[in-house]
Amino acid sequence: MSNRIVRIAFSIVIILVLGFVGLVFGTVTGMNIGGNYFTSFEFMGARGYEATGIIGSFVGVTLGILAGIVLSRLIFKKRH
């Protein structure tokens, strides 16, 4: 396999792993905030910890994917 294919595959794995980690942390954090502070908050037909868990998962997976992209670009940055 060429070096380019290995780098692309490794970048995809990094992005997916960090996206999943962000999803988990975002969901747990959102559920914690919603269950303790925003019990009457409604979003997408859900209420309280369920609603803020949904928002947390959206935010978490987005930040995780962005972190994965940045990290993979930093790892494979061409050195002059």
Image (cartoon, rainbow, N blue to C red):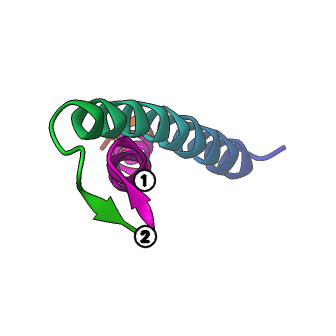
The quadrant where residue 43 appears: bottom left
Task: Determine the CA span between mark 1 and mark 2.
Answer: 9 Å
Q: What residue would you read off at disc 1?
A: 54
| Image position of 31 with respect to 51: above or below | above
Left or right of residue 4: residue 67: left
Position of residue 64 measured from the top left corner of the image (x, y, whole percent)? 40, 44
The quadrant where residue 37 appears: top left
The answer to if 45 sits in the magenta stretch is: yes
Position of residue 18 measured from the top left corner of the image (x, y, whole percent)? 48, 36
What residue range appears in magenta?
44-73
Element carrying mark 2: loop
> What amino acid type is highlighted by mark number 1?
Ile
User: Which residue, as the protein is rendered here, is positioned at the far bottom?
Assistant: 44
Position of residue 42 measured from the top left corner of the image (x, y, whole percent)? 30, 62
Nearest to the observer: residue 76 or residue 49: 49
User: Counting residues from the N terminus, which is met first, the one under dot 1 or under dot 2?
Assistant: 2
Assign the magenta stretch its main secondary structure. Answer: helix
Q: Are marks 1 and 2 in contact (CB under 8 Å)?
A: yes
Left or right of residue 39: residue 18: right
In the rendered image, is residue 49 in sight? Answer: yes
Q: Residue, x 43% and y 59% (percent of image)?
A: 46
Nearest to the observer: residue 77 or residue 18: 18
Tell me if mark 2 has few (under 14), some (14-19) or many (20+) residues whose alpha carbon lies within 10 angstroms of its own: few
Left or right of residue 23: residue 35: left
Element carrying mark 1: helix
| Image position of 24 with respect to 8: above or below | above
In the rendered image, is residue 77 in sight? Answer: no
Q: What residue would you read off at disc 2?
A: 44
